[in-house]
Image (cartoon, coloured by chain):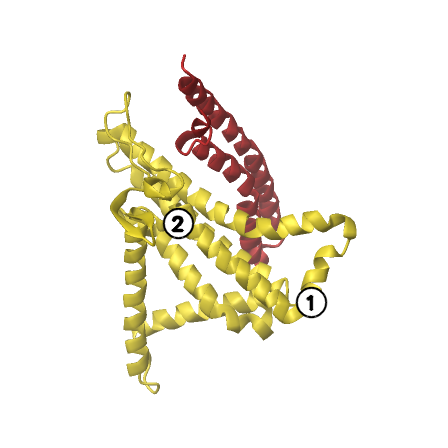
Amino acid sequence: MTDRGLILACSAIGAGLALIAGIGPGVGQGIAAGHGASAVGRNPGARGTIMSTMLLGQAVAETTGLYGFVVALILLYANPLIGKL
Amino acid sequence: MGNGSSLLLSGIGGQGLVQNEVTFGVNGFLRYRFLGQEVWLTTTHICMFIVMLVLIVFALIANRVIRKADPEKAPGPFLNVIELLVETVDNLTKTNMGEKHGLKFSNYIGTIFAFILLANISGLFGLRPPTADYGVTLGLALITFVLIHYNGFKHQKMAHITNLFKPALLTPINIIGEIATPLSMSLRLFGNVVSGTVMMGLIYGLLGKIALIWPSVLHAYFDLFSGAIQTYVFSLLTMVFISNNFEE
């Protein structure tokens, strides 16, 4: 196996591993959605405010997952390690 | 720079297993030299130009309609829509930034809202969303960064700097937090839009002839729903970060 092949193979594995970061935002968004649903159940009048607060919180919680996604993209398409050969 | 000016996602072509070509990267069309640098005219520029053209034409028509409007008669349907949009943006800034300062920012918030929304949903019309290029989102986030600190100095004077050292132990964390704000905002928008683009590109590239009508459901989710939510989040975070500096 050439050096380049080794780097490419390991980068592909690393990109897959980076997407494990998707677990956290999934759990976090689920918790936020659950609490949002119970808040709407308790106070249906404040539905609009609760919805926008929940969506904002979920979008912020999503960021860490997206960092993993960006790392995977960099490993696949703009690999910095190949330049080090 | 060259074709790698796209930073990410350049020069992706399906090889081997894939029969159809998987294309979701930024393509360079025209190479030219600018100030001794090699620069490319890419899909991002063209799609962004189309989005800007749509916005400018809309603004010109709206300007004409507003100027010709007769204040004594009931407004026509187009004028009604414009009034609704302006009132929505005004209410958004007023509720999030307070009655006192809110209206001053409704121009900026309305502009980035319209631009990001149109850029995100341009994937529906076969364009590659301009916001799926990190250069665009970083630019937008840097404008917000400058606005945050301009307003910080304007409203708090030197306390804006000394607040960084308030708990002396937390100084490095405060400084990193300030720098991380534009980075996380731009990466959030970029990651969301580019993930939708990558998935649609994979579906069209890998499934080819099977992907006939049903991907429209995915378009509705990735382009419309996700794009609208991210637009809202970007402008809401801009408003929140700017208005954090208002009260001393």
Residue B14 position in % (x across, y down): 28, 28
* Element under disc 1: loop
Query: Pointer 2: what residue?
Result: B131
- In the displayed structure, B168 sits above or below A34; it is below
What tint does the image give chain A? red
Outermost residue to the top: A1
For badge 2, the amino acid type reads: Thr
- In the displayed structure, B226 sits above or below B17; it is below
- Please report whichever mark, 1 or 2, sits nearer to the chain's N-terminal start: 2
B5 vs B212, left or right, is right
B227 vs B31, left or right, is right
Q: Looking at this view, is A67 or B240 the one in front?
A: A67
Q: Looking at this view, is B200 or B188 the one in front?
A: B188
State the residue at coordinates (30%, 41%): B216
Query: Pointer 1: what residue?
Result: B158
State the residue at coordinates (59%, 62%): B149
Chain at numbered mark 2: B
Chain at numbered mark 1: B
Q: Looking at this view, is B216 or A63 the one in front?
A: A63
Number of marks present in the image shown:
2
Q: Looking at this view, is B206 or A39 the one in front?
A: B206
State the residue at coordinates (54%, 61%): B146
How far apart in space, not on screen, are marks 1 and 2 (Cα)? Answer: 35 Å
Which chain: yellow? B
| Marks 1 and 2 share the same chain | yes
Residue B69 position in % (x across, y down): 31, 82
State the residue at coordinates (49%, 34%): A71
B28 vs A13, left or right, is left
Image quadrant holding the N terminus of chain B, namely: top left
Outermost residue to the right: B168
B155 vs A11, left or right, is right
